[in-house]
Image: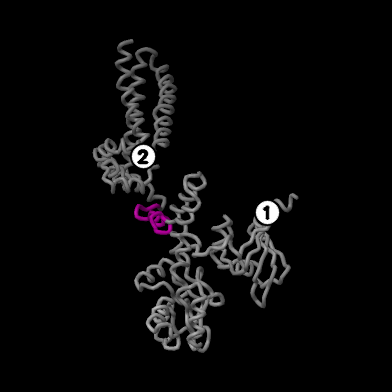
């Protein structure tokens, strides 16, 4: 019996090492590279080792599989050799197969890998140093194995240099971040507001200024040829600090008037409005294409030290204006003013769960505020979405159903839908069941 215990000791040690290999493989595969990178920046040597291993996953996994396979086979062979003295050759093979299958499955594979999933970071940090030594020790063998593997794969048309670059592209990285944030939000680990802010930042490189601009029909602009007193009165009543100025035609923007400059001029002339040269206070307008991404426009705002730009299409026709606040609203949501009104007048919820929505409300705002999932990659406004889906400009009273929502046209002025009734899926289900 003592001899059997002495023989079992090296087998136990081999299986322990094999379990460490299994735990390291799972932990290093599932570990967050972003978190390890931050730990390395903070000075963690263990995190630096983890990042070295993860940077070459193929070599790391090759070392783990090589060591694990070798140790498991060696442990099984030793077990068979020991049991042959007691059970005979034939019986020892079957007993070893059954015994080692249970031991390896439960204690060498499932148990350590479950622990690695539950304590991914701590296991990865703890086992990084010994595994890094194993990788360096087995480097020649692993290199030969990798060469052989790629030679076999080349027979099936898979080349070593033809790995998919999309996995490391910016688009793939952004989608990975977006998916991770959405998953953590579903699990309750990320608040809705934080999820929306991160999503808004990721959307800056995809959205165009035409998607968030204030349309020319909605923007406030003044005639520069109006009397100075009328301009001062209009600026005083207006909630915006920068107002486009036009001359001749409303679409012919000749400059932008800053209310701060107007106030300084009033102080300089001691309130004498007629003494103010309005044209000297107007700064040159800045025109940007409607296809400019929000990321590019935000950077342009920073470079020009400006906060407002006029948006034009490819023909130079005025489409609207965009401000820094419009871009920030995509990240933080609508920023409240100094005198916020309760709720929003352009979206009104009814007792039956439906919503009365102005046609000019952006689809993205509805999705963000009410957790809807209407497509926002085409039409910008809710009216535009209905027109895009129906292929026509519906009349008042017409009803449609798509994307799980119900739409009823309430008002139409000329070729513009001004008001709709939108019933989301949950409310639609309640209506049909009642």
* Residue found 47% across the figure and 67% down from its top: 326
Image spot of residue 32 (x, y percent) = 38, 45
The verdict on residue 183 being magenta is no
- Tell me if I can see residue 427 in this picture: yes
In the rendered view of the protein, which quadrant contains the N terminus? top left
Left or right position of 372 against 84:
right
Q: Is residue 327 above or below residue 41?
A: below
Q: Nearer the viewer, residue 295 or 270?
A: 270
Image spot of residue 169 (x, y percent) = 39, 58
For disc 1, the marked residue is 427
Q: Which residues are magenta?
A: 158-173
> Where, by quadrant of the figure, is residue 36 drawn?
top left
Left or right position of 319 against 433:
left
The verdict on residue 168 being magenta is yes
Indicate which label's residue lies in the foreground, 1 or 2: 1
- Tell me if I can see residue 315 in this picture: no
Q: Nearer the viewer, residue 244 or 273?
A: 273
Of mark 1 and mark 2, the one earlier in the sequence is 2
Helix, strand or loop: magenta stretch? helix
The tag on residue 121 is: 2
Q: Going by the picture, which residue comes out furthest to the right?
A: 434
Q: Is residue 54 above or below residue 161?
A: above
């Amino acid at each position: 019996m003592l001899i059997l215990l002495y023989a079992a000791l090296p087998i136990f040690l081999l299986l322990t090492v094999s379990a460490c290999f299994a735990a390291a493989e799972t932990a290093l595969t599932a570990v967050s590279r972003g978190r390890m990178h931050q730990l390395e920046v903070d000075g963690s040597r263990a995190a630096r080792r983890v990042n070295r291993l993860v940077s070459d996953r193929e070599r790391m996994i090759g070392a783990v599989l090589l060591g694990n396979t070798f140790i498991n086979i060696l442990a099984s062979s030793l077990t068979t050799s020991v049991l042959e003295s007691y059970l005979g050759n034939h019986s020892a093979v079957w007993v070893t197969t059954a015994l080692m299958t249970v031991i390896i499955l439960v204690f060498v594979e499932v148990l350590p890998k479950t622990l690695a999933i539950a304590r991914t970071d701590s296991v990865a940090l703890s086992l990084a140093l010994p595994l890094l030594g194993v990788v360096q020790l087995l480097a020649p063998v692993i290199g030969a194995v990798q060469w052989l593997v790629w030679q076999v794969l080349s027979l099936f048309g898979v080349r070593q240099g033809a790995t998919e670059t999309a996995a490391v592209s910016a688009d793939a990285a952004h989608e990975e971040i977006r998916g991770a944030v959405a998953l953590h939000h579903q699990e309750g680990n990320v608040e809705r507001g934080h999820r929306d802010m991160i999503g808004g930042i990721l959307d800056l490189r995809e959205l165009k200024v035409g998607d968030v601009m204030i349309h020319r029909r909605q923007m406030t602009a003044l005639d520069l040829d109006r009397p100075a007193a009328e301009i001062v009165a209009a600026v005083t009543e207006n909630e915006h600090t920068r107002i486009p100025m036009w001359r001749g035609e409303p679409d012919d923007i000749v400059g932008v008037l800053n209310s701060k400059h107007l106030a300084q001029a009033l102080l300089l002339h001691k309130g004498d409005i007629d003494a103010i040269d309005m044209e000297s206070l107007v700064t040159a307008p800045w025109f940007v294409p409607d296809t400019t991404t929000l990321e590019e426009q935000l950077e342009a705002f920073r470079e020009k030290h400006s906060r407002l730009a006029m948006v034009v299409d490819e023909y130079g026709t005025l489409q609207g204006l965009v401000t820094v606040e419009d871009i920030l609203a995509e990240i933080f949501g609508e920023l409240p003013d100094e005198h916020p009104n309760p709720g929003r007048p352009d979206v009104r919820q009814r007792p039956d769960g439906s919503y009365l929505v102005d046609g000019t409300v952006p689809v993205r705002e509805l999705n963000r505020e009410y957790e809807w999932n209407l497509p926002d990659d085409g039409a910008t406004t809710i009216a535009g979405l209905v027109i895009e889906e129906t292929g026509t400009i519906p009349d008042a009273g017409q009803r449609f159903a798509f994307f799980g929502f119900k739409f009823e046209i309430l008002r139409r002025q000329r070729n513009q839908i001004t008001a709709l009734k939108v019933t989301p899926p949950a409310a639609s289900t309640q209506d049909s069941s009642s």
